[in-house]
C-alpha cells in the first residue's frame, strides 16, 4: 500500500509519475482495475462539500497530486509528497507504455470533434495504439448506448475528459469498462494540438497554473477557490501544530 497524505481529509498517494504508469501497466497485464484521480486544490475543496465527489475520490485506487498547490499543502502539513502527477503527463507516459502492446484507448469527452482530433493526432504519434472516441456532451438517454459502445471496444485505458467532478463520478459508476480509467479534464485539447502546455521551464518553476490563467482568463472565476484552499490548509496546520 502506497503512503498517503491527508489534505483537508482527501487522501493523496505519494506516488511518482513513473510509479503511477507502472501501476497502470501492471493492472492491464494482470487483468485488474485501476482508477486514478488526479486531485487539484479545486477538487480537494469541492470534495469537502460534495458527497458524490468525495465518495468517488475515496473509492479511487490512486489519488495523485495534480499541481503545485497540492505539493505546497503537503509540505506545510509536514508530510511532503515527492512530485506532482498531472492527467496529461500520465496519459503521455501511458501511451508510451501501451504503444508497444497494442492497447486500445477510449477517449470520452471534450467538445464535438476534439476527441476525434486527439485520437487522429495521437495514433500518428503512437501507431501501436488503437483509439476510439466520443465527445462529452451526450444526453442522459444516450448514455446507455455510449457505455455499450465503450464496453464493445474493450479498452485497456478509458480517459474521461468530462470536467471535474463529473468525470470522477462517472468513472466511479462505470468501473467495469476498462482496466485503467483516469479523469483527465481538458487534456484532449492538448492531445488534439488545439492548446499548448506551458513550456517546460514554466512547468518546472511551478507556474503552469499562472500560464494557463493568462492564456485562458475565463479560468479566473474558478480560482476563487485557491485562497479558500490556502486558508483551510493553514487552519489545518495550526490545528495539527505543524506551523
Ligand atoms: N466537458 C465535457 N462535457 C461536459 C462539460 C465539460 O466533455 O458536459 C469537457 C470540456 O469540453 C473540457 C473539459 O471537460 O474539455 C474541461 O474539464 P476541466 O475544466 O475539469 O479541465 P481542466 O481545464 O481543469 O483541465
Image (cartoon, rainbow, N blue to C red):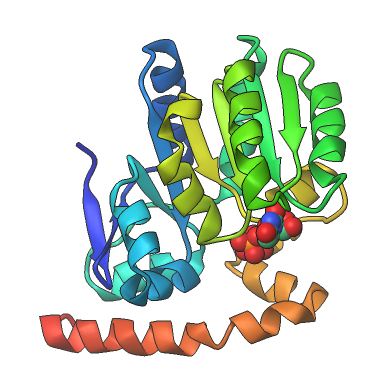
- Residue 75 falls left or right of residue 160: left
Q: Compared with residue 204, is residue 87 higher up or lower down, i.e. above or below?
A: above
Answer left or right for 133 relative to 33. right
- Residue at 86 percent across and 29 percent down: it is 120
Which residue occupies the foreground of this view, 182 or 152? Answer: 152
User: Compared with residue 5, is residue 232 higher up or lower down, i.e. above or below?
Assistant: below
x, y (%) of residue 127?
79, 15
Q: Position of residue 160 (x, y in %)?
A: 60, 44
**Observer-nearest residue: 225 or 151?**
151
Q: Is residue 241 visible?
A: no
Is residue 185 visible in this depiction of the protein? yes
Percent across and percent down for residue 40 are 48, 65
Return the residue nearer the eye: 16 or 45. Answer: 45
Q: Give the mark count.
A: 0
Quadrant of the image where one finds ligand 1: bottom right
Where residue 232 sits, quadrant-wise, is bottom left
Residue drawn at point x = 29 percent, y = 87 percent: 234
Is the N terminus in the top left, top right, bottom left or bottom right quadrant? Answer: top left
Q: Position of residue 26 (x, y in %)?
A: 39, 19
Amino acid at each position: 500500500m502506497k503512503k498517503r497524505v491527508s489534505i483537508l481529509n482527501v487522501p493523496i498517494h505519494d506516488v511518482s509519475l513513473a510509479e503511477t504508469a507502472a501501476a497502470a501497466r501492471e493492472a492491464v497485464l494482470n487483468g485488474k482495475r485501476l482508477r486514478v484521480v488526479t486531485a487539484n486544490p479545486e477538487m480537494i475543496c469541492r470534495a469537502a462539500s460534495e458527497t458524490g465527489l468525495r465518495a468517488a475520490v475515496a473509492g479511487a485506487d490512486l489519488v495523485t497530486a495534480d499541481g503545485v498547490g497540492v505539493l505546497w499543502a503537503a509540505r506545510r502539513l509536514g508530510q511532503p509528497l515527492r512530485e506532482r502527477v498531472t492527467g496529461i503527463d500520465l496519459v503521455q507516459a501511458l501511451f508510451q507504455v501501451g504503444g508497444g502492446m497494442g492497447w486500445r484507448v477510449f477517449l470520452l469527452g471534450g467538445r464535438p470533434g476534439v476527441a476525434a482530433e486527439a485520437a487522429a493526432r495521437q495514433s500518428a504519434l503512437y501507431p501501436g495504439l488503437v483509439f476510439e472516441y466520443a465527445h462529452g456532451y451526450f444526453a442522459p438517454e444516450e448514455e446507455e448506448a455510449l457505455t455499450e459502445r465503450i464496453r464493445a471496444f474493450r479498452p485497456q485505458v478509458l480517459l474521461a475528459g468530462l470536467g471535474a467532478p463529473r468525470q470522477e463520478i462517472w468513472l466511479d459508476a462505470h468501473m467495469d469498462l476498462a482496466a485503467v480509467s483516469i479523469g483527465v479534464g481538458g487534456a484532449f485539447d492538448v492531445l488534439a494540438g488545439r492548446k499548448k502546455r506551458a513550456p517546460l521551464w514554466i512547468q518546472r518553476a511551478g507556474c503552469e497554473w499562472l500560464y494557463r490563467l493568462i492564456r485562458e482568463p475565463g479560468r479566473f472565476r474558478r480560482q476563487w477557490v485557491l485562497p479558500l484552499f490556502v486558508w483551510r490548509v493553514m487552519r489545518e496546520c495550526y490545528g495539527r501544530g505543524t506551523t
